[in-house]
Image (tube, helix red, strand yellow):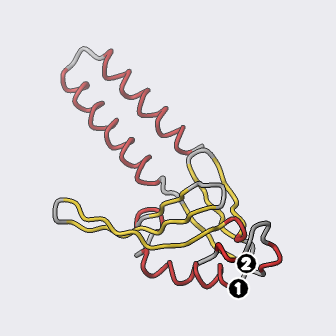
Amino acid sequence: MLLAAGVLAAVAVGCWGALSASPQERLASGAICLVLLTLTFAGYRRRLVAGPGGLLIRGLTGTRTVQWWQVRSLTEGTNRRLGAGSTTIEVDLHDDDLLIFGRTDLGTDPTEVLPELQRWWSVTPRTDWPVNGRERS
């Protein structure tokens, strides 16, 4: 909801600037529009919450719940590009979805979060699993 309001406000300011005759008003509206969009998208981050029931994932389109028996594996992904490295958490689900969370998504270093996720995942009773427990690594 807040994301839509921020985008709508930026569009309104952009329209005001496009209809303005003064170059100063156009410049001011462009700056305001840029600030609004930056604040809107900087405030939006995907959130991941883990607990005994599974994962709660808040995204742009709503909230998704993933129970622990749906998780096939939890791994650390690393990538190097142009000399900079990044670490992610990859959550592979039995329905072949792959969820990837980085530092921005988690709000902290993924290497600190992964052991906690693995701890929650490892204590899940295997009786909840609709698939063979041997697939779990």
Residue found 56% across the figure and 47% down from its top: 60
Judging from the image, what secondary structure is the residue with disc 2 in? Answer: loop
Residue 3 located left or right of residue 17: right
Task: Give me the disc on residue 8.
Answer: none
Instruction: Locate residue 133: give its quadrant.
Output: bottom right
Task: Provide residue 37's location: percent of width, then percent of height.
Answer: 38, 41
Residue 96 located left or right of residue 124: left
Q: Give the alpha-carbon distance from disc 2 to disc 1, as whole Å.
A: 8 Å
Residue 61 located left or right of residue 104: right
Instruction: Locate residue 47: give its quadrant.
Output: bottom right
Please, which residue is most extreme toward the right here?
A: 127
Q: Residues at badges 2 and 1 in contact (C-beta under 8 Å)?
A: yes
The residue carrying pointer 2 sits among few (fewer than 14), some (14 to 19) or many (20 or more) residues within 10 Å by Cα, namely: few
Task: Give me the disc on residue 52.
Answer: 2
**Viewer-proximal residue, 81 or 7?**
81
Task: Look at the image and tell me in which quarter the N terminus lies.
Answer: top right
* Amino acid type, callout 2: Pro
Residue found 41% across the figure and 33% down from its top: 10
Residue found 73% across the figure and 78% down from its top: 52
Q: Earlier in the sequence, mark 2 or mark 1?
A: 2
The residue carrying pointer 1 sits among few (fewer than 14), some (14 to 19) or many (20 or more) residues within 10 Å by Cα, namely: few
Task: Provide residue 111's location: percent of width, then percent of height.
Answer: 42, 79
The residue beneath circle 1 is 123
Task: Provide residue 113's location: percent of width, then percent of height.
Answer: 50, 78
